[in-house]
Amino acid sequence: MRVAILLALLTTSASAVAGAVSIASPDYAQTFAYGGMISRQLYLNRGGGELAARVTFSNLPYAGDDEPRRDEAFDFHFPGVRLDSKRGTFLARSGQHEFISVARFREGLACGWIDLAPGAKIYLLKDHGRVTATVTATDYPRVGIRWVEMDNNFSLQNLLTGLFGEFRVQADN
């Protein structure tokens, strides 16, 4: 698992002069080994005032007559990522003691929501169905997908996902 986290951090192309932070959630999930993420949402953990993520995994790609569809939701909390209510931003302190923006409140027509800051990504690392979550953030914008789901192996798909973003083949219906 540590190798996958190292790979994820290396592929973020963090600059040596830029501030960066990486926070692993102490929570983990045990879900379908071959299932996938179907939804995700950031929220404020009111109890601790920290950033948290709810991720739903499903066996949908493998559901059928003999295996009904099942969805499982799990929460991952990120200790040390605190809300600055004046700015509406979730901040984390880097190793150089500077604050890095991780997420922010957004306003919508009916209600607001939380999304990742331009320099942040969440990595969901799966190892035989055991999922861990790590949020990384820098003080400069990063390109590519924001939520990266990876298996703990060095497959070509995982390397391409880490380098270039989402790599999925989907059939048109």
Image (tube, helix red, strand yellow):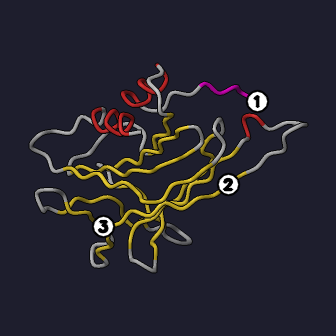
Of residues 24 and 119, the one nearer the viewer is 24
Q: Is residue 156 above or below residue 15?
A: above
**What residue does disc 3 label?**
80
**What residue does disc 1 label?**
173
| Picture quadrant where residue 92 is located | bottom left
Real-space Cα distance between discs 3 and 1?
A: 43 Å
Residue at 70% x, 25% y is 171
Residue at 29% x, 51% y is 22
Instruction: Report the predominant secondary structure element of the magenta stretch.
Output: loop
The amino acid at mark 1 is: Asn
The amino acid at mark 2 is: Glu
**What residue does disc 2 label?**
72
Real-space Cα distance between discs 2 and 1?
A: 25 Å
Q: Judge left or right: residue 139 versus residue 96.
A: right
Of residues 166 and 35, the one nearer the viewer is 35
User: Which class describes the residues within 10 Å of circle 1: few (<14), some (14-19), or many (20+)?
Assistant: few
Q: Earlier in the sequence, mark 2 or mark 1?
A: 2
